[in-house]
Amino acid sequence: MRVLVTGHQGYLGTVMVPILQAAGHDVVGLDSGFFADCVLGPAPTDPPALQVDLRDVTTGQLADVDAVIHLAALSNDPLGALAPEITHDINHHASVRLARLAKEAGVSRFLYASTCSVYGSAGQDLVTEDAPLRPLTPYAESKVRVEDDAAALADSDFSPVFLRNATAFGFSPRLRADIVLNNLVGHAVLTGHVRVLSDGTPWRPLVHAQDIARAFLACLVAPRDTIHCRAYNVGTEQNNLTVAEIAEAVGDVVPDSEVVITGESGADPRSYRVDFSRARAGLGYEAEWSIPDGAAELYRAYTDYGLTAATFAERFTRLHHLKTLQGNAVLDQSMRRLTARA
Ligand SMILES: NC(=O)c1ccc[n+]([C@@H]2O[C@H](COP(=O)([O-])OP(=O)(O)OC[C@H]3O[C@@H](n4cnc5c(N)ncnc54)[C@H](O)[C@@H]3O)[C@@H](O)[C@H]2O)c1
């Protein structure tokens, strides 16, 4: 299958592309390259790609594509809070436009990277895909809107699918340090402290980046009737942990580290425990990576590749790096490139 992967130079895309290629798919990327140079360890090999802003894609660029995997986005809550209107513009408006153009171009599958954070504050019970969506941030709100608007485009020739990923973890050559497990392992390696700023009580389901890639692969090849206009939670019940439990797992893996729960950021209302049985039953999909294995993988990568405090806080932190690109006049205030890429 010829697959266009938007956001292929991001944290998840960089892990996903080789997994799709190994399964025999012909991958084309699309990315404006915000984090193209933010690499830890050996540089990845990128597929052929369109270096365009998502907001400027044309139908012609989608010709001959069988499926779109749509990852490109401003990808977390702090970014969304900093610039809610740009988050809306890229994450919602440009995503729905992409889905519409894909449909016009004859693309038959549109696999969308949604998030379990659409469940917001969901209490102690396990939430299924049918639970009410209660997004608490502009980022999560944008994901819900894309799901609604892309679902309205579904017909006999066009199948949108909504993969509601748990929070990712694990090594990617284009590392992100601003997601919980990657962040806690980094602090532990660099300072000896596993530092939790909340009170540690919120539930956070986690899933390895490779397991997310395998879920997209499963949706790419599943029978149309199985995936047509469906939402799938992506993760495993084994990795439904509280932030304090995640911190304890890190403390067990990183030698001589100590867990410190400061509580200084106050209560975090985003808390959800997630049921992953639909993907298990419908796609035969199981997420494989455990938290201790993921923490150990990160510990090895950070020490082998020489993670530093500066790169951890700056280059591998999405919000910081985008502000640097704006400060250096690489991006304008609406996150459009002012300078062409080399
Ligand atoms: N990482 C997670 O924990 C997680 C969890 C659930 C869902 N998701 C979703 O998965 C997707 C990928 O996440 P990630 O962690 O790889 O994020 P990321 O920030 O590492 O990658 C996003 C990519 O999109 C590109 N991009 C952003 N705006 C663009 C634009 N206007 N035009 C072209 N390219 C643009 C960036 O350059 C970057 O390469 C996102 O949609 C995110 O919301 C991620």
Image (tube, grey):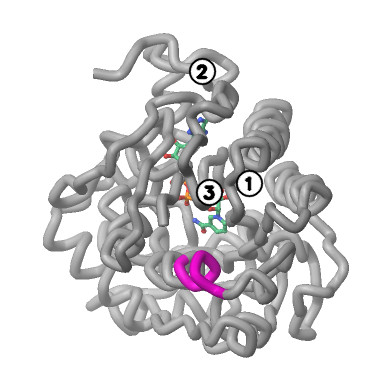
Question: Where does residue 117 sit, x and y in percent of width and height?
Answer: 69, 61
Residue 202 in sight in this render: no
Identify residue for label 3.
Answer: 68
* Labels 3 and 1: the sequence-earlier one: 3
Residue receiving disc 2: 336
Residue 220 picture location, percent across and down:
51, 65
In the displayed structure, would residue 141 be above or below residue 303? above
**Front position among marks 2 and 3:** 3
Q: Which residues are magenta?
A: 217-222
Can you tell which of label 1 and label 2 is closer to the viewer? 2
> Local crowd at mark 3 within 10 Å, few (<14), some, or many (≥20)?
many
Q: Is residue 128 above or below residue 314?
A: below
Q: Mark 2 packing: few (<14 Cα in 10 Å), some, or many (20+)?
A: some
Q: State the image coordinates of residue 36 (x, y, percent, origin top left).
A: 31, 35
In the displayed structure image, the side of residue 247 where residue 267 appears, left or right: right
* 3 lies above or below 270: above
Judge from the rendering whether residue 331 lies leftward or rightward of residue 78; answer left or right: left
Of the image marks 1 and 2, the number of the one nearer the N terminus: 1
Q: Mark 3 falls on what kind of element?
A: strand
Identity of the residue drawn at 74% across and 84% down: 126
Q: Is residue 263 above or below residue 277?
A: above
Label 2 amino acid? Answer: Arg
Residue carrying label 1: 77
Picture residue at 79% right of the left edge, 85% below the top: 125
Q: Amino acid at mark 1?
A: Asp
Q: Main secondary structure of the magenta part?
A: helix
